[in-house]
Image (cartoon, rainbow, N blue to C red):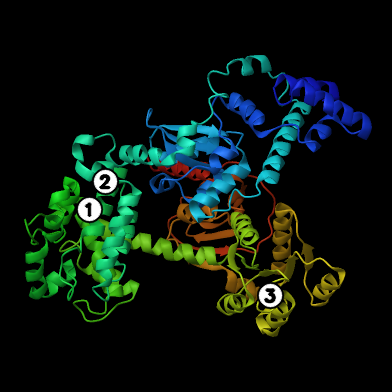
Amino acid sequence: MQDGEIRNTLLQLGLINQYQLEYADEWVKRSHDSFLNAVLELRLINEVSLLKYLATLEKTKYVSTEKLSKLKFSQRVLSYISSERAQRLNAMPIYLDPGSGAVVFVMSYPFTENRIEEIKDIMQGMNVNIYVALPSAIDALIKKGFFNDASAFDNIQDSVYEDIERIVRSMFSERSEGTGSDVDTDNRLSNTSESPDMELSPLIAELPDIMLKEDTKDIVVDKSVSKVTGIWALADEKLLELINTFANILDAMKGGQKGHSSVVAKKSISLAERLGASREEMYYIELAAYLHEIGKRSDIHITLLAIHADDKYLEAARSSYNLPITLFSKVNLPQETVNILRHLYEFYDGSGIPDGLSQDKIPRGSRIISIIDAFEDLIHNPDNYAGKTFDVSTAINMLRMNTDILFDPKYVSIFAQILTNEEMKKKILAASPWVLVADPDAENASMLDFKLTQQGFNVVVVKDTEKGKEAIKNHTFDLIITEVDITPNDGFDFIYSIRKDSRYINVPIIILSKVSDPSSVERGLNLGVIDYITKPYSPDVFVLKVKKTIENFNQQRTYEEKKQRGVSGSLSEISIPDILQILSNARRTGLLSITSSKGTGEIYLDSGRIVDAIFGGLRGEEAFYQIVGWEDGTFSLDPDVLMLGSTINRSTDGLIMEGLRRLDESKK
C-alpha cells in the first residue's frame, strides 16, 4: 500500500488521531522514511487503540496489559489448562463469569479455528468466552500464574510495543498481498456498544477476591447448591489447601507417612480424570483423599492389602473406618465425600467392610483411593504390613494379583498405564537438549528459562557458580550460558572449571553479560566460548542463536553419542497419540521412528508441531494417518535429526483425531 492509503486507513481505524497523523507527516519529511515506519518508530499507536480494533475484528472484548497485570488467580481456574498448552496456544483462562457461567480466556490475535477448537475441547462442553490481549501480556500472565513470577509484568513495555509493531506491519503486509484489503472499517467500528469499548470489568480485574468466591462456588457445586451445604458450598482452592496442610501435619506425626495424603489426593485426581469423572466428582474425591487418614491409628497404616493379609488390620479398620466422618460431622461434609470415606475398606468381591458392597456398588472414589493408598503404602512406607518397601513394578504387580478380590481390575490397569506414561514422559522429555543458565539476575534468568522452555529445551537455572558446578555434575548439558559478573567465582573461572571436566571439553558455552569492556570480551573469546553477547540484548534473537548452536553441536556428535541420547520403547507401554501429545505439549523437535508388523514409519516434529511423515510410498498427512493407529511394535525418538521440510500444516490434535476417526471407520 502507498503512504496515502496507510495514512487514511490508520486514521479511519482509530489507531492514530489527526494530531498524530500530522506529527508523523512532519517526521516523514525530515527523515524521508515511509509513513508506517514513522508511526511505528515514534510509537504513536497505543495498545488500547489496537486492542479495540482487534476486538472489533474478532467480535469480542479486549483486556489491556495493565488490567492483566493486576489479575489474581483462582488455582481452580488455573487447573483448566496445563502450562505447556497455555504457552503453545498463547491463551489463558482468567475467571469464571458469575453472570453467564462461562469461563473467560484471553488469547492473542488472530483467533484461528484450531486454537478456538482446542480451547473448547479442553473445557469439555463448558461455555467459553475468549477476549483478545497482546501476546507478551499473555506470556507474562502465564509466568505469573504457573511459575509464580511476581516480576513477570515488570519492564514489559518494550515487548508490548514489539507486539504492536509486528501486528500492525502484518496488517499492511496482508493488505499489500491482497489478503486483507477493502476492510469495512466504518461498519466494524460503528458497533462499539457490542465489544471494543466493553473492556474487562475493572471490578473483576482489580478486586479478584470477590471474583474468586463466585468462581469456585459455581465450579465446585456445578450450580447444584442443594447437594452441598455449609462451609463446603463456598469452598475454594484456598480451603482445600488448608485441609491439605492440616492433613500433612497429621501425616508427619505418623513417621513414615509424611505427605501421604497429598500424594494420594494428587494421584487419585489423575486416575479419576482418566476415568472421565466430572469436575464436581473430582472435588469430592480430592476432599476424601485429604481426610481419609484423619483420626486413625498412627502406629499402623490400614490398606486393603493389609486388611486381607492380617486380622490385626481388619480389627483396626472396623474400629476406625468412620472416624474422619465423625470428626467432621459438625461441618456438614458433602454426602458424596462421606460415602467415599465410609466405603474405603470395601473389597471388590463384596467381602469387605462395613457394608459388604461389591464392584460398581462401591463408590467410584472409594475404589480409586483404595488403589492409590495401597500403592503408596507399598513403595514408601517401610512399616507397612509387609515390613518393607517395594519398587514400582513390584507394587503394581501386587495390586494386579489382587484384582477381582480387593481392587477394581479396570482401575488398576488404567493406573498402571498412567504410571507407565509418566515414566515414559520423563524419558522422552529428558532426551531433549539441556541448557544451563548461570545468572544472578533473577529477572533475566526467569525470562530465559521461559523462552527456552517454550522452544522445547530442558532448562536448569542457577544463581551462583557453586550451584552451577553442582548442576554440571548431576546433568549432561548441551549448552551453557553464563554471566561474567557472578559469585563466588566470576564467569571466567567458572568456564575454566567446566573445561576441566572431560565431558565438557567440546560443549558450547555462551557468555551473556552486562560486562562489556573489550578486555573482558577478548578474555572470554580466548577461553573458547561460542559467543560473547552483552546486555541489553534481544531475547528472541538470542533464543534463535541458542537453537542454531545446539543444532551444530549435535551434528558433530558420534553415532554412539546420538544413540545414547535417544529414547526407545514399546507401543505396549505407551500409544503413538500419547507420545505425540507429550512431544507437542513440550514443544519438542525430533524424529519419531515406529516399527510394527505393518512396516516402518517416520514422524518429524519441529518445536512440537508435526511437520512431516513418511510411510512406504506415502508422505505427509496420508502417511501420518497410516501410522498413528499402530498398536504393536517399538518406537525410538532421535532429538538430533535434521528436518526434511514441512509437508503438514494441520494441528497435532487435529491430525490425531482425524487419524483415529479413520481407524474407527476402517474397523466398521
- The C terminus, quarter of image: top left
Q: Indicate the amino acid at tag 3.
A: Thr
Badge nearest the viewer, 2 or 3: 2
**Dot 1 and dot 2 residues touching (CB under 8 Å):** yes
Q: Amino acid at mark 1?
A: Gly
Residue corresponding to mark 2: 281
User: Quadrant of residue 388 in the image?
Assistant: bottom left
Label 3: few (<14), some or many (≥20) within 10 Å?
Answer: few
State the SS at label 1: helix
Give, as a three-letter code, the residue at label 2.
Answer: Glu
Q: Residue at x 60, y 72 (%)?
A: 563
Q: Where is residue 6 drawn, in percent x and y?
A: 80, 24
As drawn, 384 above or below 452: below
Percent across and percent down for residue 438 are 65, 69
Q: Callout 2: few (<14), some (14-19), or many (20+) C-alpha neighbours within 10 Å?
A: many
| Residue that carries the numbered disc 1 in the rendered image | 365
Q: Position of residue 483 (x, y in %)?
A: 71, 69
Residue 55 is marked as none
